[in-house]
Image: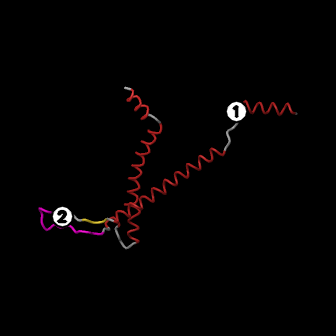
Amino acid sequence: MSMIKEFKEFAMRGNVIDLAVGVVIGGAFGKIVTSLVDQIIMPPIGVLTGGIDFSAMKWVLKPADDSDPKHKIAEVAIQYGAFINVMIQFVIIAFTIFLVVKAINRLTRKQQAAPPAPPATEVLLTEIRDLLKK
């Protein structure tokens, strides 16, 4: 029973839950970026490059052989166009994460820069001290 208790304590830590939430959100964000690259960014790039569809770009090492229906041989190809799409997705994700981290760092710097206000009792004691000096 103690192992179950230890596991429960481990699983309910804030860090583990934060990590789980981050993984789920990251997966959803990955799908959004994939859609952004495939449906919004790549078509204009394809138009600018003369109608080239990057996802269809490949270097065929061995063409498919459909001459014998019983022994079909699949095509063997290096799909460098899909790799280009993934690289663009990576750059977008990396830049977005950079912007988020930069914003978080700016907020934490502002919080650290402003000194905390002294407690009311300390302010009152300071005023009394200043009055006694006069």
Residue 85 in the image, given as x and y percentages of width and height: 38, 62
| Start-end of magenta stretch | 59-71
Residue 19 in the image, given as x and y percentages of width and height: 44, 42
Give above or below for 65 relative to 90. Answer: below
Q: Residue furthest bottom?
A: 50
- In the picture, measured across the screen, residue 118 lies left or right of residue 39, that is right
Whether tag 2 and tag 1 are in contact, CB under 8 A, the answer is no
Give above or below for 128 relative to 16. Answer: above
- Give the prevailing secondary structure in the magenta stretch: loop
Give above or below for 8 relative to 90. Answer: above
Give above or below for 36 relative to 21. Answer: below
Give the crowd class for mark 2: few <14, some 14-19, many >=20 residues within 10 Å.
some
Looking at the picture, which amino acid does disc 1 mark? Answer: Pro
Label whose residue precedes the other's in the sequence (2 or 1): 2
- Point 46% across, 41% down: residue: 18
Q: Residue 73: which disc? A: 2
| Residue 66 lies within the magenta run | yes
| Residue 76 lies within the magenta run | no
According to the image, label 1 marks what residue?
A: 119
